[in-house]
Image (cartoon, rainbow, N blue to C red):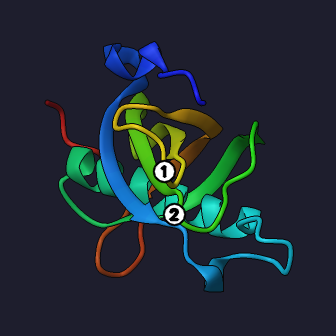
Amino acid sequence: MIEPDKRLLRSDVGEPTVRTMAMPKDANWLGDIFGGWLMSNADIAGAVLAYRRATGKVVTVGVKDFDFTSPVYIGDVVTFFTRIAKVGRTSVTVHVRVYSERAGAQPGEHLEVACGTFVYVHVDDLGNAVQVPEI
């Protein structure tokens, strides 16, 4: 049985931004979910928070790091928690932590499966970098 992760209760993990279920189309022939699927969804979650903070369009300009700590399997419910790590003049850096709830697990039993840091730039309709508004 997976031990409940008490870190989900701490504010430094961030806010749950995206939650989805890993499906057979997202897996390799052994039943493990592709790392690219996990990174793609983490990028989407990070972009949601960056968009909110920038109050407008953002584009991904970099992935500082992304670590896989445990596999994700078909049927897992995967939650992407985000928090702003840094706000620059035109950029927003977002830290994403990924937790999985295994099929058949008790509610609240989560396992951290990945984490990463994404950098987004706030852009106008022409794709030019623009300043992130002050809060």
User: Can the viewer see residue 129?
Assistant: no
Instruction: Residue 60 in the image: state x and y as whole percent.
Output: 53, 61
Which residue is situated farthest in the bottom direction here? Answer: 25
Instruction: Residue 18 in the image: state x and y as whole percent.
Output: 35, 56
Q: Amino acid at mark 1?
A: Gly
> Could you say which is closer to the camera, residue 91 or residue 4?
4
Q: Is residue 113 left or right of residue 12?
A: right
> Could you say which is closer to the camera, residue 22 or residue 39?
22
Q: Amino acid at mark 2?
A: Asn
The residue beneath circle 1 is 104
User: Which circle marks residue 58 in the picture?
Assistant: none
Kindly report which numbered mark, 1 or 2, lies closer to the viewer in this rendering. Answer: 1
The structure residue drawn at horizontal position 52% and vertical position 40%, both measured from the top left corner, is 99
The structure residue drawn at horizontal position 29% and vertical position 79%, both measured from the top left corner, is 125
| Quarter where residue 124 is shown | bottom left
Instruction: Residue 25 in the image: state x and y as whole percent.
Output: 63, 86
The residue beneath circle 2 is 41
Number of other residues with Cα within 10 Å of mark 2, as a class: few under 14, some 14 to 19, many 20 or more: some
The structure residue drawn at horizontal position 57% and vertical position 46%, both measured from the top left corner, is 118
